[in-house]
Image (tube, coloured by chain):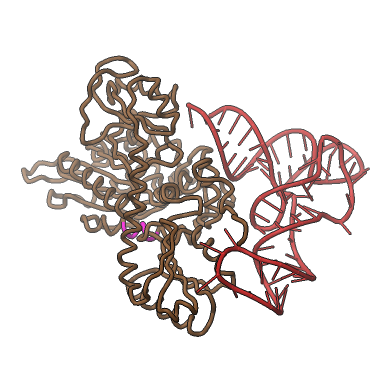
Amino acid sequence: MAKEKETFNTSKKNNFSEWYTEIIQKAELADVRYNVKGFIVFQPWSVLSMEKMFYYMESTLRKKGHLPYFFPTVIPEENFKKESSHVKGFAPEVFWLENVKGEGKLALRPTSETAFYQMFSLWIRSYKDLPFKTYQRANIFRYETKATRPFLRSREFHWIEAHCAHASEEDAMKQVKEDMETTKEVLHDIYGLPFIFFQRPEWDKFAGAKNTFAADVLNPDGKVVQQPSTHLLEDQFAKAFNVKFKDKDEKEKYVHITCYGPAISRIFASVIAVHGDDKGLRFPWKIAPIQIVIVPFSQDKNVMKKTEELKKDLEKNNITIKIDLTDKRPGEKFYYWEMKGVPLRIEIGKKEIKSKELIIYRRDIDKKEKIKEKDLLKYVEITSKEIDKNLTKNADKLFENNIMGAKTKAEIKKVIGYGKIAKCMFCSITKSGEKCAEVIEKETGAQVRGIKLEKEKASGNCPICGKKATEVVYIARSY
RNA sequence: GGGGUCGUAGUAUAGCCUGGCUAGUAUCCGAGGUUUGGGACUUCGUGACCCCGGUUCAAAUCCGGGCGACCCCA
């Protein structure tokens, strides 16, 4: 046997940053050599997976009554300026198109509130039109400063944004809860990503929102990544864009708007980071670019015939499958597809034909087993579910073990130093708590992420200012 | 936002300090042969000094600027 060769120069645990950089290149997820900073080429292995991610997210939204749109990529400056806190928050990140003859200045959308609500004002007339639930799949542009990272923070990213108009604040809040439910159904139950939904503190809200709720996913390096966020926009945007409806009582009222933004390309970063290991990627079954790869040991006629047969049977069951016919040796193919994260591999040669058996390798647990050929479909059906369950369970466990209580400033420091999330009492997440949050950020480099929606009971005092605690907050470093 | 490291074939690197060679090696790629049950071997071949300017008889090497990448801290 040949000498052990590691797939990566470093392990995920010892140096997450380098592991991440390396896996993106090795697994051909993105080519960062495109010659504009912060813009990368998404390669097939990431696109195929993200297509599936989009599919699950979009079909879940549609099931819940959202209808799809494609809005223009450009937004006129005029729209952009209508909501003052929004423009203030986003202005530094906007790419402007200059030299557009006679058209005024145009922004490349950094998000599309100001495009959607402009049209909402034309479309929404009556309470019968509400709730008005939309979404679009789009790429958006934000001028991130120098810390760009493939998938995690790029200047162009691919996302879904859902915009809804409601008759009342209660309805809007219901929508926010539905968005959280959607996040669980898709991010957790399909992509296998654990998260906590936080209500963000006053000082960390989306520009122009009354309240922001955001899901934080934990990265293996101990930092959290903000994933989907949903915002209660109250009626600020409705007033700015004059989105009104005639209610049952015959009065004109402003709608209550909510928006929800799952960024698929960024969530993909978490899929890589959370599930990957030192052999490479590990895809959850439903979002694997290829779900099963067949590696034949020889190109013998009978082996080839059997391989084709298996492929057809599996494809009939909607399984994405590939036969590896390259002239590499089997061992090299094994390592390659393991690095690529394909969940299942079938190995087949003359011996298996004779014994009517198959060797199956499971990427999630890195083990092989033998099964009867006739049991293949049933095996795949059961195992694919087990794979997802297993990956999700492991991720959940890791997440839970990374939350630690802290009672004093020193303890917060310690917990953050371990690369974990600190849970502690806090004075307030309204304006008055901001100073304490700044102290924490200055001394630990971590931010107050917010409170859980199902409110936890506070007791004792704020470890920073010593005032009576009103909230239980979570503190973490973030991307 | 602050700091650091760096840019030589598709990839990873040597050479740079102390200017001068046909720019070395491995891998990848292409052609041939032997192989194929966990990262094969062999023969031949193609391929590179990030861009702009400066110093110099002479620049991959020194200087300035630009562009880009990575890492750490906030």
Q: Residue at the far left: name it.
A: A249
In the drawing, does residue A105 fall left or right of residue A448?
Answer: right
Q: Residue at x 30, y 48 (%)?
A: A116
Q: Give above or below for A350 relative to A448.
A: below
Q: In x, y percent, where is residue A30?
A: 52, 54
Q: From the image, which quarter does the C terminus of chain A lie in? A: top left
Visible in this render: residue A255?
no
Chain B painted colour: red
Q: From the image, which quarter does the N terminus of chain A lie in? A: bottom right
In the drawing, does residue A27 fall left or right of residue B11?
Answer: left
Q: In x, y percent, where is residue A133?
A: 23, 52
Visible in this render: residue A200?
yes
In the drawing, does residue A113 fall left or right of residue A410?
Answer: left
What letter labels the chain drawn in brown?
Answer: A
Q: Give above or below for A243 relative to A158.
A: above
Q: In x, y percent, where is residue B24?
A: 81, 55
Q: Residue at x 23, y 36 (%)?
A: A453
Q: In x, y percent, where is residue A306?
A: 44, 81
Which segment is the magenta one? A51-56
Q: Residue at x 59, y 55 (%)?
A: A4
In the drawing, does residue A74 fall left or right of residue A429?
Answer: right
Q: For residue A59, what is the image quadrant? A: bottom left
Q: Nearer the viewer, residue A167 or A376?
A: A376
Is A383 in the magenta?
no
Q: Give above or below for A309 relative to A157.
A: below
Q: Nearer the viewer, residue A183 or A120?
A: A183
Main secondary structure found in the magenta portion: helix
Q: Nearer the viewer, residue A178 or A66?
A: A178
Q: Residue at x 29, y 46 (%)?
A: A260
